[in-house]
Amino acid sequence: MNDLATRLARALGDSGCGVLERPIDLLARAHDASHYLLHPKAVAVPRDAGEVAEVMRACTRLGVPLTFRGGGTSLSGQALTDSVLVDTRTAFSGVEVLDEGRRVRVQPGVTVRAVNARLAPYRRRLGPDPASEGACTLGGVIANNSSGMQCGTELNAYRTIESMVVVLPSGTVVDSSRPDADRLLAEREPALHAGLLALRDRLRGDAESVATLRRLFSIKNTMGYGLNAFLDHDAPVELLVRLMVGSEGTLGFVASAVFRTVEVLPSTATGLLVFDDVHVASASVPALEDVGVATAELLDAASLRVAQADPVVAEQLRRLEVDRHAALLVELQATTPDELRGLQDDAAPRFAELPLATAADLTTDPTERALLWRTRKGLYSAVAGAKPTGSNALLEDVAVPVDRLGDLSTGLAELFATHAYDEPVVFGHARDGNLHFMLTEDFSSQHHLGRYEAFTHDMVDLVLDLGGTLKAEHGTGRIMAPFVERQYGATLTGAMREVKQLLDPAGILNPDSVLTDDPGVWLRDLKTAPKVEPEVDRCVECGFCEPVCPSRTLTTTPRQRIVLRREMVAAAERGDTALLESLERDYEYDAVQTCAADGMCATACPVLIDTGDLTRRLRADATSRAADRGWALAADRWSTATRLGSAALTAADRLPSSVPRRLAGVARRVAGTEHVPAYDPVLTSGGRKRPALDDPDPQAVLLASCTGTLFGGGATAAFVRLCERAGVGLRTPPGLDGLCCGTPWKSKGQLTGYERMRDRVREAVDVATEGGRLPVVVDASSCAEGLALLLAEADVRVLDALDFTVGHVAERLPPARRLDRVVVHPTCSTTATGATAALVALAGKVADDVVVPVDWGCCAFAGDRGLLHPELTAAATAKEAAEVVSVDGGSTAYVSSNRTCEIGMTKATGRAYRHVLEVLDEATEPPSV
């Protein structure tokens, strides 16, 4: 261990709290979404509030600072340290829905999206709705007083928190929900209790301070501490709760919190109001206040152009010819469709009075609405991802009274021109007077650093002259800590320092965030972005990918895989060979071997990075000539290879399970776990040879998956019977037994074999589809996705059997016998291809109660990856498995759409998963005579 990690571990003793000290662990956790970078010397991984208290006590004794870290989506540098970083995400993901969804208790490591998923059945949601809701954790939402696109100042964390459990730096735990909480606080922390009372009374007695606080907190404001608490609440324990909101981990640790939730209005209409330019759009916002729009999100011309580059952009955006235009993304919300129509009728003449460049167009179509919101929520990362390689994206966040928004827009444009920022991007929550603007800067240049410094000082003057706030919702952090006194004045800043002294007298919690004595802290420790690999260079380290990564709790996440490559380049440039060798050694398992390469990261990434592309390329670079020849030979003899694999599994299934396990174990020890799969009895016997079909009038070509031959299962037979039952003819391509979608070669980086298989499949498919006239249907979702990639340059449609069954087969089947329940495991491939809806729809054909676990995710079986590294699938499925087991009862079927996923989920849950088509086949089979 390094010195600090050793001292921390010794100070923690037998508390049970883990301490990470490997360079790969420290550097992977150093990076967040901000443009700052500090490298921690130790990472503490507590399992509960008690262990957090032990960490704080230990750091106090050692005299070293600590910083709490959740989702790493903060933008102002408030989640970084060169001392002790405390992981508050891994062990703190609990959610408890209360009072039929009207309240919810959360731990700090759970994401906003995960909480809202649990509230959805009650038609409720959290008030805060930040754009990063898929990745940001509730700890960060509370610590930054996050708001978002709809919540304004009325539904943010400050306004909707009811109670919390706080761990103070002294180790004292305060549960504000207890009736005697204030009395206990007075007994256990008398100086704190008395100090809060005295400060409350002094502030309330200062009319100028009261007026300043009322003015600044009437708009979005996350600068400094929330001194408005002293005006809004009386009891010290309630003051403590509200001061914790927005304190950025500088006053204590929020172990859990209870939020009051808000109703989800089910009838909505969403659309763009397009204006000639951003200034006209900004000046038009006050006119919308009486229209009743729930949102008014500003997008300038650069934002619109970046959004149009998304391959799945909304139609309204796609057809827009962008010049200097800007748009407001607005939404009307109502309880019923009739009420919504009334709102639309009332809004139409008001919209017509606006200086619009095109007619207002609001849609109620769920798909189009989702695409519009996808654009807005991913906008920062998408825009930042388009920056030049090697530069940094700087996102500022200010607010002014809504009637000064036009002045702010004009003033910013003048500053951009003055300081030669040629391509700024402006967007934000216009309804709240809250603008975000993004600049691109190169911090390796002293000239550019000086430009950034001068611009920031001018921007501070502009915003404060307009009566605004310097940080509206992203938190003060390091970037604005030196400017707190400029916004509040000496008296209120002095009161904030008193709050800090009362709660953290040793000053160990997140120094230089919120408050600082260092006027230049915001210009130091700036992140650079070295050019590393074309697959990932556009990554802005936003962290949106992390919650969907199957290896996130085992080894590394996509963001961490990328930043570690950057750290390797930096180490090489510094000549730090010892660090480079350490990172390269540990990267092989932590980042390459345990990457499922499932593409889930790309579904969450605003700039569509698939870190699996990097992994596959690294595997290809590392492959030996012998391995390349072996896999190429397998491609040439795939029919033989699959039959041999099937026979081996069948033979193993007939032996006592200890025998094949032992044999596989010996082989793994000799050849390595990356090359020899483990044996597990869940595999059962191998499958049969794929059928040859030649209907005289086929409607599709069936390219049955070879996973059925290798691993068994009944998907192919079930699909064929369903088509026969529905009168749908099928044909199979010539030489089917030797064909494959190519995924086994691609995922392992075996490019020679992949190319040989690609050429063979293209030729066979061209013949079978009559030059592309017929679609190709694949009965395993991952194979459908793989085949579509394999045939990307061919003129042929590839369909998942799920989609084909919904579109051409299901309605021709006899009524299905009903089950009580079907539990569905969507896959990474159904997510990528959009086939999840068909999977759920087919489950609905046989049961009214269709359960998709809230915690579902990629099972990481990934062909044979779950056999090579069973620990990966175990980690990936742990939460979903626990949820699945809890919904047992009645006649329940467990379904998915991929044989290897079915094996993985069967292993994880102890429940027999099958392809949904098998269940549908059985349910619609005519009764025997």
Image (cartoon, rainbow, N blue to C red):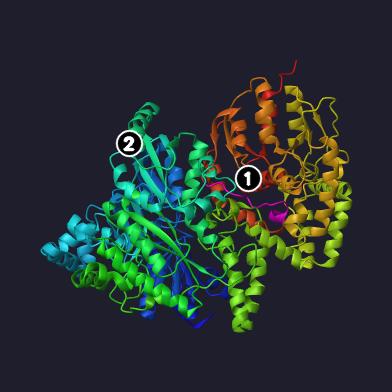
State how many labels appear: 2
Quadrant location of the C terminus in the rendered image: top right
Residue type at the position of mark 1: Thr
Q: Nearer the viewer, residue 842 or 237?
A: 842
Label 1, label 2: how far apart the Cα atoms are: 45 Å
Residue 229: numbered disc? none
> Can you tell which of label 1 and label 2 is closer to the viewer?
2
Q: Residue under circle 2?
A: 350
State the image quarter where residue 144 is shown.
Answer: bottom left
Q: Nearer the viewer, residue 37 or 501?
A: 37
State the image quarter where residue 476 is shown.
Answer: bottom left
**Magenta range:** 855-867
| Residue 557 can be seen in this image | no
Q: Position of residue 741 (x, y in %)?
A: 77, 47
Residue density around tag 1, few if under 14, some if 14–19, many if 20 or more, within 10 Å: many
Residue type at the position of mark 2: Arg
Looking at the image, which residue is at 29% across and 68% down? 461
Q: Position of residue 570 (x, y in %)?
A: 59, 77
Quadrant location of the N terminus in the rendered image: bottom right
Q: Residue under circle 1?
A: 827
Residue density around tag 2, few if under 14, some if 14–19, many if 20 or more, within 10 Å: few
State the image quarter where residue 668 is shown.
Answer: bottom right
At mark 1, the secondary structure is: loop
Q: Position of residue 821 (x, y in %)?
A: 56, 32
Q: Is residue 857 magenta?
A: yes
Looking at the image, which residue is at 62% across and 36% down? 839
